[in-house]
Image (spheres, rainbow, N blue to C red):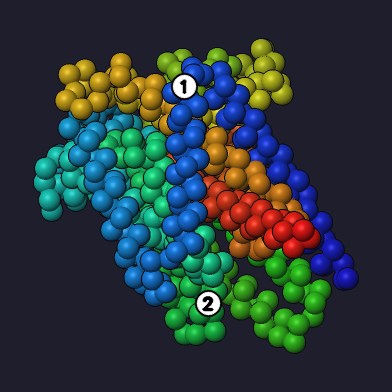
Amino acid sequence: MRIGIRLATCLEKIFGVLFITFSLFLVYCSVEKWRSARIGAVSVFSILCVLFLFCILLVQSGNIVSQKRRINVVYIFILSLCIHLFAVLLFGQDIEQVSDFKSALETADLDFPLTENIVNYRVFSNWAIYPIYLKLLQMIFGYGSLTGMIFNAVLSAIASALIYVICVLWFNNDKIGHMSALLYTLWPSNLFYIVILTPEFVNITLTLAFFVLLGMIIRYRNTKYVYGLVILSAIDLCLSGFFKSIDKIILVDMCIVVFLLLIKGESLRLPDHKKIIKSTFFFVVLFVFSYFMSNKVIYAGLDYAYGTTLNRNPAAHFICVGLNPETYGMWNETWGGVYTKNAIESGFDFDEATSLTFQRLRQQIEEKDYLTSAYFVEKFKIAWADLSSELWWTDYSLKEDGSFLMKERWSWQMINITQSFWVLICFFICIDAFFLFKKTEKYHLVICMLLFGFALLLVISEVQGRYKCVIYPYMSILAAEGIERVTSFTSSVLQKVLHHK
């Protein structure tokens, strides 16, 4: 075995150990949270119901609707759309938009340039496109917040279909694709959260579209269409970062995987390895150039739309809140406005605002010396223990006199269902992590690294329950693979036992 293959294998095994450790923590935190909740007949019944649902998904995925994949894509889209529209029908009439979501809806009603209520969008440019997106929907369809909810349902249905396409392109596995899409479609917190006007749903769709384009680039790498696909994928990924900043994680993920593949190829000395290296280098340069040019063009358009210069990098705010000494990374009154206050006082000199923000944070770290292992363990638990924090809208947005959902009747039942689902998702991801360690697959590795990279981001950044929803599609794929591996392993063991008898 040549040195490049040994190095790549060693790096993959190191990551495998890290990912297994991470997945074990996921299981531990989720089970501990479930056990500390109101244990009783309702909790046990909830997890049994969710487990039964997983069994139905497994059986259903084994009987693919059609051998024609295009028909499967249409079937998944229509099924997901119907389910999410039904959720809008149930919850949408009793909801009112608050906080950032209300601000986005109100901004969408303004004329260009959007000069009113501009401070937040000038500082937090990661929200700046979303009001424009809502404005376009309003101009075409009208109907206020209802249109945004309906398009959340449409985007979720597209996302479910794209998950299936990714599994087909990357793994050539219809069964896992079908099961992953259904898991994501039936993800409880997503169904509850569909009525909130938030940019995460746009990000999820664009990010999944990027991975579809990436699969098409690999498949059509020797055709003339590949250059257009590379440029289109760069534009898509760049645009997705304006709705949720996980595009940087994906870029790092891609760089690591490309590095591993190149050092393996160099060691094997394939007949066309020099050609492969040159073409890969060219594609990377073309992608990076297209990505950064798209970034500049989008920001120029936003500056024009808002009539002023927007902040190019609000990372200081998220790190300041994420490492605050009071709430383990959750937003609070003390630290939530530090960066915005510094930006206003510096005359929107964002470099100075960043410097002042980090200066204050560094002072707190030195004085209180609180960034210990216990601090980060607690922060990990807050970020990953459950999904119930995503149901905050039952306390803030759900109308007291709602015709369908009554808080005192439904809140605990909803929490039980979401937590039971989360426990099983974490368990099957953990199972899949052990199989990944045994045999690494490059496409599988990409998804695991994305999830792990997002977990590292939450270590230093702000923690909110809804932030995790952007990686639910990839968790659905890993959980579906875990279910498939468990059933395959159990089936093979039973066959051996029966054969021995």
The crowd level at tag 1 (other Cα within 10 Å; few <14, some 14-19, many 20+) is few
For label 2, the residue is: 219
Vertical order, 412 against 14 (above or below)? above
Between 342 and 282, the one lying in front of the other is 282
Vertical order, 494 against 261 (above or below)? above
Residue 135: x %, y % from top left: 19, 46
| Amino acid type of the residue tagged 1 in the rendering | Ala
Between 42 and 448, the one lying in front of the other is 42
Which secondary structure lies at badge 1? Answer: helix
Residue 24 picture quarter? top right
- Distance from disc 1 to disc 2, alpha carbons, whole Å, reads 51 Å
The crowd level at tag 2 (other Cα within 10 Å; few <14, some 14-19, many 20+) is few
Vertical order, 369 against 26 (above or below)? above
Which secondary structure lies at badge 2? Answer: helix
Q: In this view, does 131 lie to the left or right of 464?
A: left
Toward the bottom, the furthest residue is 271
For label 1, the residue is: 41
Q: Is residue 291 left or right of residue 194?
A: right
Residue 159: x %, y % from top left: 38, 55
Marks 1 and 2, the one that precedes in the sequence: 1
Q: In which quarter of the image is the N terminus?
A: bottom right
Toward the front, the furthest residue is 501
Residue 137: x %, y % from top left: 18, 50
Say how many tags the image has.
2
Q: Can residue 387 be seen in this view?
A: no
Q: In this view, does 497 lie to the left or right of 423?
A: right
| Amino acid type of the residue tagged 2 in the rendering | Arg
Point 71% across, 70% down: residue: 262
